[in-house]
């Protein structure tokens, strides 16, 4: 008897999040501030549950959207970047890279506990949040969770999280 696996995937226009950002690269260089219409796509693998689905599309979309909506229309700033310093000062966020400095209203920013706002690490951030929401709110641990973040049409990054009990 062949074995079978199931996968569900969601990507929707409401999982688009429009943000400002800049990344450091090659260790010591820094992009100019610019924006993207990012799009998240989420895949979950696992056995069929009692309702004959891996996970409810509706729950998956809802939980993913909660996370992407928090990012939408914000400036994304990494708090762990070795060359970009991000400092909260009351109602503003001061950002410094070498001689360049920016001051943003605090409410316009999302400070992310990542090293760089690459599509890879944005996918990692969303995957971590979604893994936690699925466990805590749906009582569900995926065998495999993949999050893709498309920075622009034709260029995206994907991260894969596996449950410790899922064989490689
Ligand atoms: N692997 C990754 N590479 C790059 C990332 C990333 O997140 N992961 N990010 C960037 C930049 O943020 C940048 O904004 C993208 O640059 P670019 O590809 O030049 O963007 P365009 O949309 O202008 O691309 P065109 O194909 O020239 O239209 C860089 N690399």
Image: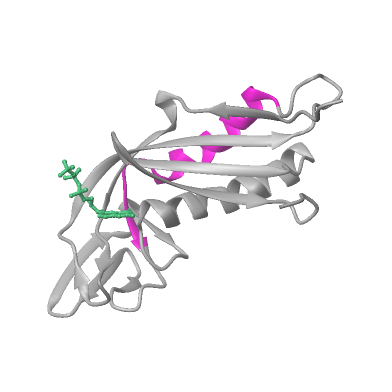
Is 60 one of the magenta-colored residues?
Answer: yes
* Quadrant location, the N terminus: top right
Up the image or down, 91 lies above or below 120; here it is below
Q: Depth check: give the residue in front, 128 or 20.
A: 128
Q: Residue at x 26, y 42 (%)?
A: 36
Q: Residue at x 23, y 77 (%)?
A: 28
Up the image or down, 122 lies above or below 82; here it is above
Q: Which residues are magenta?
A: 56-77
Q: Residue furthest top?
A: 51
**Dominant secondary structure (helix, strand or loop) of the stretch shown in magenta:** helix
Q: Residue at x 19, y 72 (%)?
A: 29
Q: Residue at x 67, y 50 (%)?
A: 132
Q: Depth check: give the residue in front, 156 or 128.
A: 156
Q: Residue furthest front?
A: 1
The percent coordinates of residue 119 (x first, y second) are 38, 51
The quarter of the picture where residue 42 lies is top right
The percent coordinates of residue 11 (x first, y second) are 48, 28
């Amino acid at each position: 008897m062949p074995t079978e696996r199931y996968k569900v995937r969601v990507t929707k226009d409401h999982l688009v999040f429009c943000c400002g950002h800049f990344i450091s690269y090659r260790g010591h260089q820094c992009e100019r501030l610019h924006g993207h219409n990012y799009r998240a796509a989420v895949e979950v693998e696992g056995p069929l549950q009692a309702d004959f689905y891996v996970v409810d599309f509706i729950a998956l979309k809802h939980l993913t959207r909660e996370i992407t909506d928090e990012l939408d229309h914000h400036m994304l700033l990494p708090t762990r970047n070795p060359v970009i310093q991000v400092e909260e000062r009351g109602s503003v966020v001061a950002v410094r890279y070498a001689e360049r400095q920016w001051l943003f209203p605090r409410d316009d920013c999302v400070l992310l506990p990542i090293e760089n706002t690459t599509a890879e690490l944005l996918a990692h951030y969303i995957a971590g949040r979604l893994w936690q929401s699925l466990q805590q709110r749906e009582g569900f641990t995926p065998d495999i969770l993949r999050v893709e973040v498309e920075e622009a049409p034709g260029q995206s990054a994907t991260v894969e999280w596996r449950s410790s009990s899922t064989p490689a």
